[in-house]
Amino acid sequence: MDNELVLKVDNIKKRYRLGVIGGGTLQGDIQSWWARIRGKEDPNLKIGSDTNTKRGSFMALDGISFEVKKGERLGIIGGNGAGKSTTLKLLSRVTAPTEGTIYINGRISSMLEVGTGFHPELTGRENVYLNGAILGMSKEEVDKKIEDIIDFSECRQFIDTPVKRYSSGMYVKLAFSVAAHLDSEILIMDEVLAVGDMNFQKKCLNKMCEVAEQEGRTILYVSHNMNTIRQLCDRCIVLQKGHLVYDGDVEEAISIYMNQSDELKTSYDYSNIPRSENETRSIQLLGLDINDRTENRVSQGENLKFTLHCKANAEAENVGFRFEIYYKDGTVVGTVFTNKELSASKGQKVDLDIELATKNFAPGRYHAVALAYEYDKFGNQVGVDRVEPALVFEVTNKDKGSLMWLHQYWGHVCFDDMQIKNIRIL
């Protein structure tokens, strides 16, 4: 393998057998197998479990291939069940591929979930030495780094306390600090920074950039937070249902990922969208139709016209509506309130014709969360019904020759032009 190549994944597949759970021992598995052959009840089956467990298999990964060079910061994104965590577990040798080959050139340090590699009965300090030993480091090598690890983790006060008493945030702080400071050539992270506080997340991202650029370490990072993917990664792959669908530029990868679930429909049915139990649903949002369009794509400055269908499940007075607008990467753009409130009797169905101005939306794709609310006796808004996503729409350039808007640098709002009143040449 090329000296600059630290990882090579060659056509790996991972198949899981559904409904097949081992007995924990060879004797138990043989007992269960022999009982099934004779049509008898499984002697190792837990009380209350179903003996007719469904059989089958699931391809978590179906023939993906990619290479990673020394010092690269590779992002891995995709929806739930796309195969991201399975990929990292295979690379970390937690499990083995069903087919295919993985070539690894260097030591791997992994954070696949909170507390991975920590023994709960050991103290934080003892777990640092344990992790170092797992990576093949001597006690003397860990001794040289342990003070830096403790300082970075912000856990000095509790470093000699068993980690079973740590909060999830403290677990992550110490685990990340260990992974970032010990001598491994490849650092693997799976959505673990979501647990830490904002300041520590920023600190971790800066540290990962530093170890990649200055120490030449390779980073593989899985996250659903597209902003952290942008900040850290210089390359990104997109997984979808066990297949690799894109490998390349970060912005293009994010665009492909965000568009996987965004469909520019003209009609929405909200009946099957899960709701929170906190909402009263005196007014229920039934659906939405885009008016006078074959798809919900508008030119910048045009109004998007749509009809919101509602039903009153109880007597409703002065119910308001708002739409929370998000860019396709999940960052919030702003909130729009309707200018009128609704009152309806129980059982009535109501249609609201609404216009959404797009003058100040930067060209791009957005989704809206719809929320109906009423006011309590203190004047606070109380949620009545909430639907996410309620609407997906795209704003295009009003002039075809306009430059492409760079959302990652310029934001998602186009303000009106500044007026130059006078130019003086001196």
Image: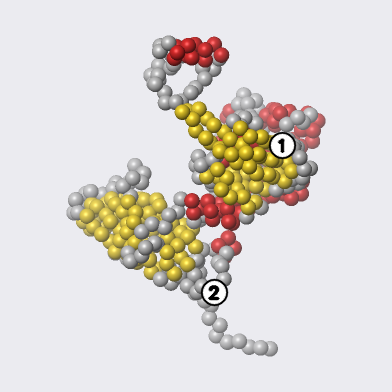
Q: Would you say 400 lies left or right of 383 here? A: right
User: On the image, numbered disc 1 is attached to which residue?
Assistant: 104
Q: Would you say 306 lies left or right of 298 here? A: left
Q: Would you say 159 lies left or right of 370 here? A: right
In terms of depth relative to the viewer, which is nearer, 96 or 319?
96
Residue 331 in view of the camera: yes
Q: Earlier in the sequence, mark 2 or mark 1?
A: 1
Q: Residues within 10 Å of mark 1 (few under 14, many from 20)?
A: some
Residue shown at 49% from the left, 33% from the top: 58
- The percent coordinates of residue 40 (x first, y second) are 40, 11
- The percent coordinates of residue 192 (x first, y second) are 58, 40
Residue 190 in view of the camera: no
Residue shown at 79% from the left, 29% from the top: 138
Residue shown at 23% from the left, 48% from the top: 313
- Element type at marker 2? loop
- The percent coordinates of residue 238 (x first, y second) are 57, 48
User: On the image, numbered disc 2 is attached to which residue?
Assistant: 401
